Image (spheres, helix red, strand yellow):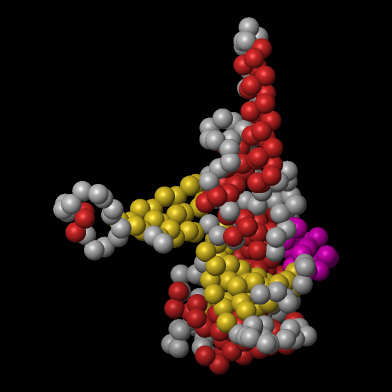
Amino acid sequence: MDETVSEFFRRTILKIPLTEMMTILKTWNFLSENQLQTVNFRQRKESLVQDLVLLCEENHASLNDAALLDIIYTQFHRHQKVWDVFQMSKGPGEDTDLFDMEQFKSSFKKILKRALKNVTVSFRDAEENAVWIRIAWGTQYRKPNQYKPAYVVYYSQTPYAFTSSSQLKSNLPLLGQALTIASKHHQIVKMDLRSRYLDSLKAIVFKQYNQTFETHNSTTPLQERSLELDINMDSRIIHENKTEKERVQRVTQEIFGDYPQPRLEFAQYKLETKFKSDLNGGILAEREEPLRCLVKFSSPHLLEALKSLAPAGIADAPLSPLLTCIPNKGMNYFKIRDK
C-alpha cells in the first residue's frame, strides 16, 4: 500500500466519530472480527487510527477499499452534503428496457474514463435497488482529488438521480451524460429541488410522504401547543373560536395530510415583474429591465413549520399555494414572472 493510499485511509478513518467507529468498520467488512478484537478502541484517536491503517496495510488494501470506506461514512452522514435532484426521460416511443445493475456500473465507468483519464469511480449497492457512486475528479494533467469527491445515488429503473453538490461544475455535463446513457435514458434535467435530507428528497420525487423522516431536536410543534382561553370569556366567543379552530385544523389536514412532512430547510422565490402604474412618466415607468426580488423562507424543518402556522394563529388558512405546493411540484426554487 503506497503512501498516498495510506494517507487516504488515515484521513478517512480520522473523521469517523469514535461512537460510530466499530459500526462503520463492521459495515465495511474489510477487517476480520479477529483483527478488530486486537485493536484498543479506548486509546487516543491518533493511535487508534494508526493501528487501523497498519491492519489495512497487512490486508493489502487498495484505493478502492478506501473509497468504499468513505462511501459508508458518507451514507452514515449523508445530511452533511447538499443534494440536488436530476430527472431523466426517455425519447418518444422508447420502451422500458430490462435493467442490469452490473451493466449500468460498467457503462457509467467507461463513459467517464473515456472522457477523462484521471478519474476514479467506486460503487456500493444499497437498499431499495439503489447504488451509491463515488467520483473523485481529476484533470487531464492532475490525479483525482480523493478529498473532494462527488456522490451520486441512483435508484435503478427510475428516472431520478441524487447528486451531492460539487465544486467542479464543469464536470456536470459529463456526469449527466454518463447517467443518461448508462441508465438508457434520452435526456436529463436538473430539478429545482435541493436539501441536505436525501430521504426527504426521495420521498418527494417518489411521492412517498406517509413515512417517518429524519427528525430534529426542537420544541413542541406550534400546532400542538394549547392556546389557553380565559375562563370568564363569553361562551359565544368560545364557540366561535372552537368552530374556527376546527376549520383551520380540517383545512390544514386536507393540504398537508396527517403524516410527517418531508424535511427541507428552505424555499426560495424569485420575482420578476415590469413596473405598472396609471401615472404617466417617472423613472420606473421608463425602465426596460424588470424589477427583481428574492424571498427565502428558512427553517430547520420548513414544511412542518408551514403546517403549524395556521393552527398557531400566525397565518390565515389556507396558506398560499406557492407555499403548500412544494412537495407536489417537487420544487423549492421558484421563479415568478408576469404572464
Between residues 55 and 149, which one lies in front from this camera angle? 149
**Left or right for 323, reference 73:** left
Q: Is residue 29 magenta?
A: yes
76 shown above or below 122: above
Question: In which quarter of the view is residue 136 placed?
Answer: bottom right
283 shown above or below 243: below
Residue drawn at (57%, 78%) of the image = 188
281 shown above or below 140: above
Span shown in magenta: 22-39
Residue drawn at (64%, 72%) of the image = 160
Residue drawn at (59%, 60%) of the image = 329
Residue 246 point in image, percent of width and height: 69, 30
Residue drawn at (62%, 10%) of the image = 233
Residue that sits furthest to the top in the current view: 232
Q: Is residue 194 visible?
A: yes
Between residues 154 and 96, which one lies in front from this camera angle? 96
Question: In which quarter of the view is residue 202 placed?
Answer: bottom right
Q: Main secondary structure of the magenta part?
A: helix
Residue 304 point in image, percent of width and height: 62, 43
